[in-house]
Image (spheres, coloured by chain):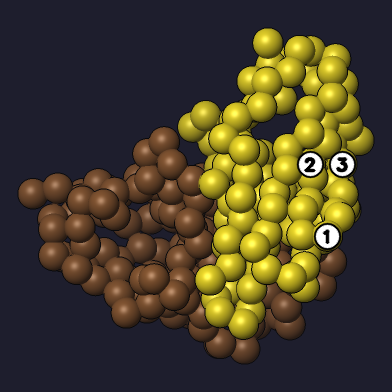
Amino acid sequence: QVTLRESGPALVKPTQTLTLTCTFSGFSLSTDGMCVSWIRQPPGKALEWLALVDWDDDKYYSTSLKTRLTISKDTSKNQVVLTMTNMDPVDTATYYCARTSGVVTGDAFDIWGQGTVVTVSS
Amino acid sequence: SHELTQPPSVSVSPGQTARITCSADALPNQYTYWYQQKPGQAPVLLIYKDTERPSGIPERFSGSSSGTTVTLTISGVQAEDEADYYCQSADSSVTFSVFGGGTKLTVL
């Protein structure tokens, strides 16, 4: 069974750096085609894709946020970490990690974590 | 940049057919994917590669594509289908992925 779980602080102050961890099981991020993305959703708003790391350690970022984002993976720990610098209240959102398995479902996010709520406030 | 446009809302009565469109502003070089999100829950993959349905997704959900518009069709809508629906596509020339603005389906 494939599962992903997000963890990190529920509250961060403006200008601080957010660090989120996605811990997954049921697949290996060293398998060809496997990727993990971070996606966020502000309250009442649409989903926004943020970043992706793939099995080959290639990384992709949202064009609008790439200067603030860093994604990394630790294959031995089955974890993917996202850092976002210079947090602002507009970054308040539920942050999800999701898997892309590539071979069958293409670029779909086929399994999602339950999400973690991050509030940016002083 | 690559953008996907969805109608903000669609309303149907139970048993009717709901159609949710997703229009791209670029040439149709990438597959489109559909997700269902119920309040307080993570999205669930409904359709991949324009028309394919993952195991466990009811047959009443189907996808189609024509030109730069893809459509999610829900046949015989049930009350439990009331949710937000998002399309998603990839655009490897600019960024990896983009979502549409979402469509709220109301079952009357």
SS for dot 3 = strand
Q: Which residue is mark 2?
A: B72
Q: Nearer the viewer, residue B92 or B47?
A: B92
Q: Do the residues indicated by labels 3 and 2 lie within the same chain of the protein?
A: yes
Residue B95 horizontal side relative to residue A116, left or right: right
Q: Which of the two discs, 1 and 2, sits closer to the camera?
A: 1
Q: Which mark is residue B67?
A: 1
Residue B34 is at least partly visible in this image: yes
Q: Is residue A37 above or below residue A110?
A: below
Number of marks = 3
SS for dot 1: loop
Image location of residue B107, percent across then percent down? 69, 16
Question: What is the display colour for chain B?
Answer: yellow
- Marks 3/2: CA–CA distance: 6 Å
Query: Farthest left residue?
Result: A122
Q: Is residue B80 visible?
A: no
Q: Earlier in the sequence, mark 1 or mark 3?
A: 3
Q: Residue at x 73, y 78 (%)?
A: A33
Which residue sits at x=24%, y=71%? A85
> Among the chains, which one is brown?
A
Question: Would you place residue B92 above or below residue A46 in this image?
Answer: below
Residue A25 sits in quarter:
bottom right
Can you give x and y, in whole percent of width and height, for residue A51 in the image? 48, 71
Residue depicted at x 32% and y 79%: A67
Q: Which mark is residue B62?
A: 3
Type of amino acid under label 2: Leu
Q: Amino acid at mark 3?
A: Ser
- The picture places residue A101, in percent across and down from the top left corner, at 72, 68
Given the image, on which type of amino acid does mark 1 rest? Answer: Gly
